[in-house]
């Protein structure tokens, strides 16, 4: 009887296992169940059969391979999706509708005015083309920011998902242990496996299974995530007030540790790479190009003029104070012309010798400060005009109605401060306006008084090439010079001296040289200083390490409103003050030389820094840099797509190999079902035979 009943139970259990396997044959990720059974033996006598356990047919090696493949595919896929979407914003460089073609065509349209520089229709079209190009460039920059914000939100959301999964794993572990004690734990193990698979989409993990079927989860480099308890992840988002990073607390009372370097694959790694590497570099390239594009146009346009000429101008905010050293080299000229274009007055300025002369007269000296120069210029203008400097801006006015201002640079030995000539540096006649500095080359000297309020602070965060935070410092601005600020930044304790050295380039921009000789460190300005003196320029904007300013250049550009609303004011003529004497015509109404110079702006070689603080530079034309940016974005998207395709193929292969080993084979299950049916039938016949035997014995006894 015992042999028969144990056989019936074992066969019935086996049929239930086969039934579950067949029912889940097409369920993705399902691991087939196997019944383990053994003979019952009483004192050397066979007493039937028993079910020892029902286990999942796991393969630790293939499962680990599948989890790693899952993580790799998820990380590569999310990068590919974002970069492909971003690439579509810029369009195909070979198409006329791409942003780069639009920008190039905007400069090319100036050539249409070469033969008819007085046509208001042509000027209107030029302005429309330029405004459209700048708008498209600004939208692209905004799209990059939007993408960065979306990536940031995705990271935050996935951190929350990880935390929920870790809690679920702890609960599933508890159920697995309980079920292992009371009976069949395969259902709880299946649930646990599902949570582990979901987690591997987000983070690369190693799984350590205990004898009781529970699992301990670690990152692949050994950071504990979950077991009987769960670690907790937290994320500081890109809110501008803190350094964004993912931290982990192993226990509720433990000190948070940065976990980003421990996340080596999975969708979180893909998002972190986008946030830390790809998107910042794309944003940097696009906005640096925008600044150079504006500067290339303005460097030419500041020497252009209309007839009548510019009656007055107030330049852009340079961030300079009247007490700053003048800092220009070379020579420049300022002229006053009447309504017919006749030169009324000419002021030749020699910055090397700190002198100026009026109408070829004797040279007079001026002080080597912005204020000293402005005062001397005001004197030199005399009755023809005035000059003043306030709030970082230089203002010039022609006193006589109908008269106007013109600017000129010699063919060789022209003026220069930072990377701009005199009129361009002060923005006296810009075609493209900007609400943020287009270049970090302020021309400031380390010995200049810093002009900031002593005790004011700014905060910088230093990260390695993978975005791992290394140090965050809030630095107090000392009284004194810019060199004193640099020294505070280089302090080993309160600054970043143990990582490298800050220094001013000759053009006034800031660079950072790493102690280890590498170039992969990056700085994020969490909090900028107050503005310098009465200007609207902060320390980060002035020295070129304000992320917000540096990555907002493209969005800040627009056609000068005075010209946009009055196309006839578009200046397409130039003056030659070097060879023109007072009383001679210096400006012609039909002159189109300025239009041709603007057309040629895209072919002028410019210096582009490859990194805001690295100091490394490359020299190329706007057209070449446009192609370089387009190529870089395309290459990143293409490489990400290739990596995603390869990872998906590896994932499919790993899943196939795992499924072939632990999945359901219907032929094998049919054989098992037949065996269990036959065993059940045999046990039933034995039970019937035993019943008949007992009945016969009872009848005989009666």
Image (tube, rainbow, N blue to C red):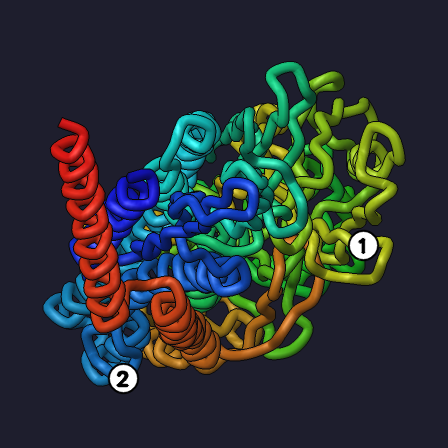
Between disc 2 and disc 1, the foreground one is: 1
Residue nearest the viewer, comparing 605 with 372? 605
The residue beneath circle 1 is: 514
Question: Residue at position x 38%, y 53% from top?
Answer: 554
Q: Quadrant of residue 96?
A: bottom left
Q: Position of residue 136 (x, y in %)?
A: 25, 59
Compared with 415, 554 (above or below) is above
Q: First in sequence, mark 2 or 1: give its number.
A: 2
Residue at disc 1, secondary structure: strand
The residues tagged by marks 2 and 1 sit, at their Cα atoms, a distance apart of: 39 Å
Please tell me in which quadrant of the rendered image residue 82 appears.
bottom left
Q: What crowding class fits label 2: few (fewer than 14 Cα within 10 Å), some (14-19), or many (20 or more)?
A: few
Asked if residue 285 can be seen in this view, the reply is no
Q: Secondary structure at mark 2?
A: loop
Q: Residue at x 42, y 50 (%)?
A: 37
Q: Is residue 503 left or right of residue 81?
A: right
Image location (x, y in percent) of residue 614: 70, 59
The residue shown at (69%, 58%) is 520
User: Could one spot residue 120 in this view of the protein?
Assistant: yes
- Residue 231 in the image: x percent, y percent? 56, 28
- Left or right for 45, reference 486: left
Q: Where's residue 519, x and y in %? A: 72, 61
Q: Residue at x 15, y 72 (%)?
A: 122
- For mark 2, what is the residue? 94
Q: Bin the neighbour count of mark 1 within 10 Å (Cα to Cα): few under 14, some 14-19, many 20 and up.
A: some
């Amino acid at each position: 009887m015992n042999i028969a009943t144990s056989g019936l139970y074992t066969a019935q259990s086996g049929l239930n296992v086969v039934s579950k396997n067949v029912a889940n044959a097409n369920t993705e990720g399902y691991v087939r169940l196997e019944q383990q059974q053994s003979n019952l033996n009483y004192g050397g006598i066979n007493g039937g059969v028993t079910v020892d356990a029902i286990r999942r047919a796991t393969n630790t090696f293939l499962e680990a391979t599948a989890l790693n493949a899952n993580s790799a595919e998820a990380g590569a896929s999310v990068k590919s999706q974002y970069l492909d979407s971003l690439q579509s914003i810029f369009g195909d460089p070979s198409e006329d509708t791409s942003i780069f073609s639009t920008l190039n065509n905007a400069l090319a349209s100036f050539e249409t005015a070469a033969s008819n520089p007085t046509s208001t229709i042509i000027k209107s079209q030029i302005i429309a083309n330029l405004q459209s190009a700048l708008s498209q460039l600004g939208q692209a920059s905004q799209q990059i920011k939007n993408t960065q914000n979306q990536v940031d939100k995705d990271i935050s959301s996935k951190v929350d998902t990880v935390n929920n999964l870790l809690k679920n794993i702890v609960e599933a572990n508890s159920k697995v242990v309980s079920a292992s004690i009371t009976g069949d734990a395969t259902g709880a193990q299946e649930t646990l496996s599902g949570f582990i698979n979901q987690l591997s989409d987000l983070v690369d993990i190693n799984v350590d299974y205990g004898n009781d079927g529970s699992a301990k989860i670690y990152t692949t480099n050994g950071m504990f995530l979950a077991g009987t308890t769960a670690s907790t992840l937290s994320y500081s988002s890109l809110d501008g007030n803190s350094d964004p990073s993912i931290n982990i607390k192993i226990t509720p009372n433990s000190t948070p540790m940065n976990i980003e370097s421990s996340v080596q694959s999975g969708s979180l790694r893909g998002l972190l790479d986008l946030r830390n590497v790809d998107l910042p570099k794309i944003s940097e390239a696009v906005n640096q190009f925008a600044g150079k594009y504006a500067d290339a146009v303005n460097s030419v346009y500041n020497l252009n003029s209309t007839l009548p000429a510019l009656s007055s101008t107030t330049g852009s905010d340079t961030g300079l104070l009247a007490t700053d050293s003048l800092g220009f080299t070379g020579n420049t000229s300022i002229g006053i012309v009447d309504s017919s274009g006749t030169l009324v007055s000419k002021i030749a300025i020699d910055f090397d010798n700190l002198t100026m002369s009026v109408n070829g007269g004797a040279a007079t000296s001026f002080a080597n400060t912005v204020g000293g120069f402005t005062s001397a210029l005001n004197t030199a203008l005399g009755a023809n005009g005035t000059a003043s400097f306030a709030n970082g801006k230089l203002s010039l006015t022609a006193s006589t109605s109908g008269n106007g201002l013109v600017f000129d640079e010699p063919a060789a030995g022209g003026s220069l401060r930072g990377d701009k000539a005199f009129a361009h540096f002060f923005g006296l006649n810009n075609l493209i306006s900007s609400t943020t500095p287009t270049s970090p080359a302020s021309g400031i000297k380390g010995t200049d008084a810093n002009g900031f309020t002593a005790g004011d602070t700014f905060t910088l965060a230093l990260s390695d090439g993978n975005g791992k935070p290394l140090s965050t410092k809030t630095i107090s601005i000392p009284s004194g010079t810019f060199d004193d600020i640099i020294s505070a930044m280089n302090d080993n304790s309160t600054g970043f001296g143990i990582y490298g050295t800050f220094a001013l380039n000759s053009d006034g921009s800031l660079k950072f040289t790493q102690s280890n000789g590498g170039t992969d460190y990056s700085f994020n300005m969490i909090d900028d200083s107050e503005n310098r003196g009465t200007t609207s320029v902060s320390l980060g904007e002035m020295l070129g390490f304000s992320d917000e300013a540096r990555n907002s250049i493209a969005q800040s550009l627009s056609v000068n409103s005075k010209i946009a609303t009055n196309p006839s004011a578009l200046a397409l003529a130039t003056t030659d003050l070097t060879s023109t004497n007072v009383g001679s015509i210096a400006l012609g109404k039909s002159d189109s030389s300025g239009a041709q110079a603007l057309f040629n702006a895209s072919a002028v070689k410019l210096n582009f820094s490859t990194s805001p603080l690295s100091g490394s530079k490359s020299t190329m034309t706007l057209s070449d840099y446009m192609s370089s940016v387009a190529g870089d974005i395309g290459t990143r998207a293409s490489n990400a797509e290739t990596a995603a395709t390869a990872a998906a193929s590896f994932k499919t292969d790993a899943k196939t190999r795992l499924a072939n080993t632990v999945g359901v084979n219907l032929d094998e299950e049919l054989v098992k079902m037949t065996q269990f049916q036959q065993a059940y039938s045999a046990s039933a016949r034995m039970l019937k035979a035993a019943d008949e035997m007992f009945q016969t014995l009872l009848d005989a006894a009666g």
